[in-house]
Image: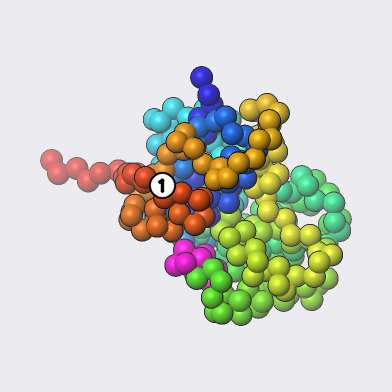
Amino acid sequence: MIPCLGIFDSGVGGFTVLNRVLERHRNISCLYLGDTARVPYGEKKPFQIRSIASEIVQWFRVQEVSAILVACNTTNSLAFDIVQDVADIPVMGLINSASATITEKRVGVLATSATVSSRAYKKHIEAIRPGTLVIEKACPELVPLIEAGHSSANSIQKIAYEYLQPLLDAQVEAIILGCSHYPLILPVLQQFVPEDVRIIDPAVAMACQLDSLLGQPEFSFQYPVLSSNTRFYVTSDPIGFATKATPLIGIRPEVELISLQPKACFF
Ligand code: DGL
């Protein structure tokens, strides 16, 4: 039986993880869940993020996935313990994966407000490489703009530049894209980041770490990487999501609407 991975994010950000995983591991099936009814997660309170994570993992358990990839740094920062407890199957997160690849002494992190407030990247990196300077910058305006399809608009360029400025002023040697939506604006970010500063997409390290569960990959790159073995679910607007997904994954997916929140009881 081929392994079935559950991958989730608040919206389209998790595609950056799905793509990296399927480029490396082709012989798997995936269930992708975008919690579109509640995007963005990054401005929510920790208790909300934890409660949402629990609902999502319970749903994946019913689907009988064999492992869960937390394709959302915000959930990874604030609710990884809950995901692990409820899942009771292997769980992988982006923060551990990315932190383990750090070799630089001065590291910048772009992330959501919730991820930055949690200091999760700083704690992980400092635990693995004591003495590393980690500077985190919250970018609250990016996810709503990316979800609205403005990934290359002038407005996003100006905002991206403002968010990068404190990291560049601090002369960081690497910048972690600490929100899975941000690799979708990589060309915008690259314009402002000097070539000798490494831009890190945590999904690359996560896809490699998956080898421990799935075995060594065969490296037979083909595009699009998606096959009929990937199914898509959202908590609102399946048609809008399919439209947004098309340029990001190379095909127009069929998207199923699901409900995660407990239903009201009328008796
Ligand atoms: N893409 C997610 C992350 O990595 C969530 C962003 C959001 O919904 O604010 O943090």
Q: Quadrant of residue 153?
A: bottom right
Q: Which residue extends farthest front?
A: 222
For the point 72% across and 74% down, the residue is 192
Residue that appears at 84% across and 65% down: 196
For label 1, being within 8 Å of ligand 1 is answered no
Question: What is the span of residues highlighted in magenta in the rendered image?
Answer: 141-149
Q: Is residue 18 visible?
A: no
Instruction: Please state the horizontal and vertical placement of residue 265, each as a whole percent of the image.
Output: 19, 42
Instruction: Between residue 23 and residue 207, name the one nearer to us.
Output: 23
Residue 182 % position (x, y)? 60, 61
Q: Which residue shows up at 62% across the image and 58% down it?
A: 183
- Residue under pointer 1: 253
* Residue 60 falls inside the magenta stretch: no
Give the percent coordinates (x, y) of residue 60. Answer: 44, 35
- Residue at position x 61%, y 80% in the image: 158
Q: Left or right: 9 with respect to 168?
A: left
Q: Residues within 10 Å of mark 1 (few under 14, many from 20)?
A: many
Indicate the position of residue 40 as horizontal and vertical percent values.
46, 61
What main secondary structure does the magenta stretch of the protein show?
A: helix
The amino acid on which the numbered mark 1 sits, given as a three-letter code, is Pro
Give yes or no for residue 144 being in the magenta stretch: yes
Left or right, 188 with reference to 48? right
Image quarter of residue 179: bottom right
- Which quarter of the figure has residue 245? bottom left
